[in-house]
Image (tube, grey):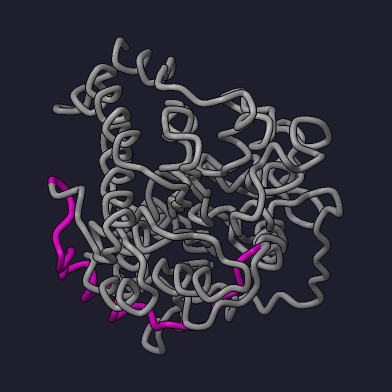
Amino acid sequence: MKYLTEFRNGEVAQRMAREIHQTATRPWKIMEVCGGQTHSIIRNGIDQMLPAGIEMIHGPGCPVCVTPLELIDKALAIAAQPDVIFCSFGDMLRVPGTEGDLFQVKGAGGDVRVVYSPLDAVELAAKNPAKQVVFFGVGFETTAPANAMSVHVARRRGLTNYSLLVSHVLVPPAIEAILQSPGNQVQGFLLAGHVCSVMGYWEYPRLAEQFGIPLVVTGFEPLDLLEGIRRVIVQLESGRHEVENAYERIVSFEGNRAAQKLLAEVFEVTDRAWRGIGVIPKSGWRLSEAYRAFDAEERFHISGIHTEESPLCRAGDVLRGAIKPAECSAFGKECTPRHPLGATMVSSEGACAAYFNYGRFISAEDLASAGSGLAGPAISGAANG
């Protein structure tokens, strides 16, 4: 990809970090909404480059992680049926349900397949008319257009054996829920650039004004994130609360209107349960009436689901930003990527996976007592690699 290494330049990152140190005069708490941003922050040591009083709080921006346990259990039940080809992206296969995961269903004989696009699942439905093909449609607004297109194409082709198990969640209602929650400490947000590439950022000025907080649209490379953090801190220090776009090479104010039109046709807004958080009103999508025949929950009518979370797992507290992963007593002990207790340990965007994969096995308090500095070994390595 062109113009990628420029956004990983270690020397520029050091200069930006020094500017942040010069700008910040007091402690601030900033939440990155997206799990992909969390991984980039931890992998590149960006949080360790910041002034001691600047805390990055990891938000519920991993769609795999917030998919409710009941829906995971329904997916397992559907995938285990003999006449079903169950399709998913790879990051869902290790997500633990109450009993087992999709890998275990596959090992027991279920036809579970990893696909690279929901349209691959549509093709499977066309080639296997005697089978019911189900795609697990998980994600924020970023992945929703492709999932919407899959049912749009299936209806156009007259495929009655294709359905979508929908777990789509929306970012603005989640931010609003966080800001309204008792004890909220978040003072500014980094908005996910890929979500805004689809939806634009026209929904956010209302939140900035209502709650008096800065929101900055930010990318995923180290320099993108440092620039987003810098802009949030500049606003906080000056008492401003605006929406800024620090990802102009990708994101426009209005977003992708064609994608938004398709989403409005295929989906309708609904209340949605978030794993570890609870129900957030009007925070998700379900298939609209015109496409309800493609709803896997309606088609299979799975009942008798009794969910049970691990009593050791504090993934819900991690998703709410109440604790850092290393503050969970099971982290790295009972809970590892090989034996996960929660989705945050196995998802490619999960905060626990980021902390485990990049060696963050000490608590935030211990890290703060050790002191922070400008030396960012991971980001320097990225610049050299």
Magenta region, residue range: 249-275
Q: Residue at x 53, y 67 (%)?
A: 165
- For the residue pair 308 and 40, the one nearer the viewer reads as 40
> Relative to 45, is 109 on the left or the right?
right
Q: In the rendered image, which quarter is residue 368 located in? A: top right
Q: Give the residue furthest to the front.
A: 25
Q: In the rendered image, which quarter is residue 300 located in? A: bottom right
- For the residue pair 250 and 156, the one nearer the viewer reads as 250
Picture coordinates of residue 376, whole percent (x, y): 41, 19
> Relative to 195, is 44 on the left or the right?
right
Q: Quadrant of the C terminus?
A: top left
Picture coordinates of residue 230, whole percent (x, y): 29, 43
Picture coordinates of residue 52, whole percent (x, y): 50, 35
Picture coordinates of residue 221, whole percent (x, y): 30, 34
Q: Give the residue furthest to the right.
A: 311
Q: How many marks?
A: 0
- Give the vertical position of 315 relative to 359 (above or below): below
Look at the image and say whether residue 95 sits in the magenta stretch. Answer: no
Q: Quadrant of the N terminus?
A: top left
Q: Residue at x 41, y 42 (%)?
A: 37
Q: Residue at x 33, y 56 (%)?
A: 236
